[in-house]
Structure formats: structure tokens, C-alpha cells
Amino acid sequence: MKVITLIENRTISKEYKCKHGLSLYIETSNHKILFDTGTDDSFVYNACKLGVNLEDIDIAVISHGHYDHGGGLEVFLKYNSKAKIYIGKDAFDRHLIKLFGIIKYSIGLKKKLISNNRLIFVDEMMKIDDELILFGNVKGDKLIPKGNDRLLKESSNGLVEKDDFEHEISLLINENDKYSLFCGCAHKGIVNIIERTKDIIDSDLNTVIGGFHLMGMKTNNATSKDFLDDLSNILGNNNIDKYYTCHCTGEQPYSYLSQKMRNLDELKTGKVIEI
């Protein structure tokens, strides 16, 4: 399996565009997959530079209903005429972020896209084939990211409340009897998402790829250090060969975790990994 980072907050070279967001191209034995699109059309520019033909993609996944992961969906639909787009059932709800404690700013997807007939809405779990499984319905409460506290959703009756992230989905890929997990921001908590996979597959994960949503955590803060220590201990004892994290993990938390975990690496725009 090959994974090419089309968009991440940072880049390995000025040759590529980088923006706050995430987009991955995943090539398996049977599929060419786009996992998230970033905020806009920057992933298209980078795909061209990196030799990825967006017209060849047969499956796209939008991990959750935030613009930094699905903002480029409309652009993708113009460049690609065949891919099915898998997305969480509540992804087009109105999603908001609270800034300065009072300002509520929309961070959702374009609602006009909801009627596109190529969209397939995922609820608890969906097995696409022997290689691909999509799932949500993560119920655990271990080490939920503190950054979730600023993230809100607006219900159909206009009530604004804390986002429960029922619109978040993750991707499992089975290749050569090895499972890889892809998640966008792990708002449900990366530990809980990994635990959820144990209900779906009778196997340990080989690789975990995605953001951990730890951005903003200060490693000189005792509470944050305790959180990161607990996280590194749990992840380090999960019998997983390799973690690649990115985007919303944050540079300070990544640096701290990487000192504790021998099997942690990071993604940047333009980076290519083989699994």
C-alpha cells in the first residue's frame, strides 16, 4: 500500500502547497482512494505535482463534517466523475467553532452538495469489500481531546450544543492480512477509535494514520503532560507496528509523544510512505 500526503499543515518542500487541513491519497491492490480533501483546491495542485491522477480515484472518504477535511469536495467532484464518496450521516449538519469564548464561526461543509447522487452516507459500519471497512459509532470515553470543547453543532430546531462527533468516520484497510486504520482528527479519541476496531476485526492493527487532535496542548502544563503520558503508554502497548500522525496533533504534543514512543512518525505534504 502506498500513501501520499496531498495536504497537511506543513510540507517537505516549497514545491508543494500546504494549508491547515488533511488530504491523503491511498493506493491499494484494488483501490485508489482519496481520504479527505483539505480546505480547497490545493490538493489538486499537489496531486499533479506528485503524479496522482484524480480521475483514477474510485473511492473518496470524508472523515467528518469540517471544512478542513471536506472543503475541497466540490472541486473533487468536478475533477472526478466516477468515485463514490463515503461520508458520515450527519456530516452536513451545521458545525461551529467557538472563538474567544463567545464568537461562533461556521466550519461546516457546503450544504448544497448533500443532494449529490454519488454520496453514500455511513452510520455505524459499512463493509465495502474484503479490503475496505468504514465505521463510526465510537462510544468509549478514554482521553477525549480537550480541543473538542470549542466545537459545536446546531440542531434542526436551532439549538446549539457541544458536538458529539457522530458524523466522524474512520477507514480500515486490509491488505495482505494486515490492517491499517485511517482517521481524520480522531475527535472521538484515538484510543477509543482503536478500541472500536476490536469489535470489527479479529486482528491487531498494523498501522495507524491520522490526526490526534491535540493541537494547542502545552507540554509545560502538568495536566497536559499527564494526558500525553497516559496516551503514549496506551498507544505504546497496543501491539501496533507504526503510528503516523499529522495535522491537528500539534507540534508540541507530537514532539513530546515522539520522545516516549519509538514507533511514532509524522506526515507532511509531499511525504510518501509504503506500508
Image (cartoon, helix red, strand yellow):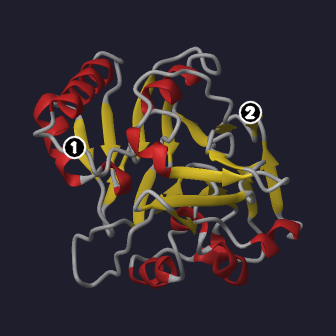
Q: CA distance from mark 2 to mark 1?
A: 31 Å
Relative to residue 200, is residue 222 drawn left or right? left
Relative to residue 200, is residue 224 drawn left or right? left
* Residue 34 x, y percent position in the rendering: 58, 62
x 24%, y 38%: residue: 264
Structural crowding at the residue carrying mark 1, measured as other residues with C-alpha within 10 Å and reported as few (<14), some (14–19) or many (≥20): many
**Vertical comparison of 179 with 95: above or below:** above
Q: Secondary structure at mark 1?
A: helix
The answer, for residue 33, to whether it is visible in the render is no
Q: Secondary structure at mark 2?
A: strand
The answer, for residue 157, to whether it is visible in the render is yes
x 68%, y 46%: residue: 167
Quarter of the rendering containing residue 269: bottom left
Location of the C terminus (image quadrant): top left
* Residue 148 x, y percent position in the rendering: 47, 44
Residue identifier under label 1: 253
* Residue 133 x, y percent position in the rendering: 67, 37
**Circle on res. 125:** 2
Inspect the image, locate mark 2, and give the three-letter code of the amino acid beneath it.
Met
